[in-house]
Image (cartoon, rainbow, N blue to C red):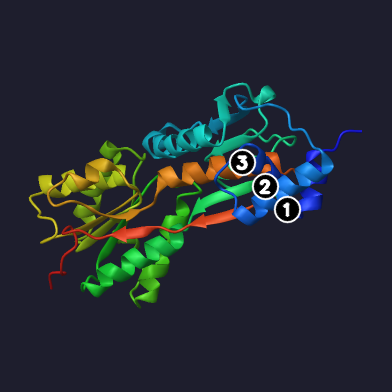
Amino acid sequence: MKPTMEEVAELAKVSRATVSRVLSDSTNVSPEKRRLVLEAVKQLGYEPLKQTNVRVPIAVHISSSPDWTKFYEKILEGIEQAASAEKLLIQDDLGQAKGLILLGNAAIKPSNVPVVVVDGLLEEEDYSLISIDERKAMLEAIQLLVKYGHRQIAFLNGPEHDIIRQERLRGYKLGILCARLPVNEALIQVATNWDRQSGYQATLQLLEQASPTALVAASSELALGAYQAIVDQGLKIPKDISLVGFDDLELTKELTPPMSRIDVSLVSMGKWAATLLKSLIDDEGRSPVRLNVPAVIRQTSSIGRAKH
């Protein structure tokens, strides 16, 4: 009976995924583990199948919500980059796929292949998850604005039915409370959608009912709409209102002044998702992984001292 890859892994005292990486000549293996695997291969007389040009088929399913197209485009870019390096083939046929990446919330719930959920709600214990530490990021943004003397800090959120994004609202409220400020519902405005026009209209409504000295938007598209609404009202950024967006959208960097933002490496999230899925496919016994991705505050001149 011919030796198997599992027997090579057992003899070398490494995972099946490590054996697979060594045999595919991956650089992501330490010299010591590579030596152990090659010695085990030689000792057992293991003969790997010639699969140099074979790619493992996977499927990527995106949430049906059209509101997050630009957000998911960046993640998809990362998935595609890593898929090439990991010898994965992205296809539409879920029936032929050896693994699945879910972007956002999806009704698809396969149980026979490894699944990695990116930025969605985790309903299955055997799925892996890559998510953004949204609460911590929003908390830090509020702390920064308070440091600049702001007390009337508004929050522009997307539709209330978007459960995932409500974590940003909770982070905002937590930041306000941690600064020992009252949560003023008049400073919380909910847009009808996640697009720029909805952000524009919601900001106009906000400015009619309150006089914030700073505004944090739950996405960069909403923030771009808020930016234009503030300017159209004859107000200056940051002299009259400081502004912070969420997500890394290129257009926010081209504004005058450039917009401060809570920056998340979406491309990296996509790369991690593809790499993680490949390791789950290679090592069937591996436990699900939970990865919480940190966000970074990119401060620009759109944040200024509060007017008193």
Q: Which residue is mark 3?
A: 277
Quadrant assignment, res 302: bottom left
Tell me, for residue 18, which label it has, or none.
2
Which residue type does callout 2 highlight? Thr
CB atoms of marks 3 and 1 within 8 Å: no
Q: Residues within 10 Å of mark 1 (few under 14, many from 20)?
A: some
Point out the frontmost of discs 3 and 2: 2
Neighbor class of circle 3 (other Cα within 10 Å; few <14, some 14-19, many 20+) is many
Query: Residue 71 sits in which quadrant?
Result: top left
Q: Quadrant of the N terminus?
A: top right
**Residue in the image at 60% along x and 53% along y:** 31
The picture places residue 125, in percent across and down from the top left corner, at 70, 50
User: What is the x, y in percent for residue 45?
Assistant: 82, 38
Q: Identify the residue at the far right of this view.
A: 1
Foreground pick, 243 / 192: 243
Is tag 3's residue or tag 2's residue first in the polypeptide sequence? 2
Is residue 82 left or right of 138 when viewed as pictured?
right
- Marked residue nearer the N-terminal end (3 or 1): 1
- Regarding residue 238, the answer to whether it shows in the image is yes
Depth check, front residue: 242 or 117: 117
What is the three-letter code of the residue carrying label 1? Val
Label 3 to label 2, Cα distance in Å?
Answer: 14 Å
Q: Is residue 177 left or right of residue 105?
A: left
Q: CB of mark 1 within 8 Å of CB of mark 2?
A: yes
**Side of 239 where 161 appears, left or right:** right
Is there any visible trace of residue 172 in the rendered image? no
Q: Which residue has dot 1 on it?
A: 14
From the viewer's side, name the closer residue of 298 and 217: 298
Q: Looking at numbered disc 3 in the image, what kind of residue is underneath it?
A: Leu
Q: What x and y, as percent, mark residue 230?
A: 16, 50
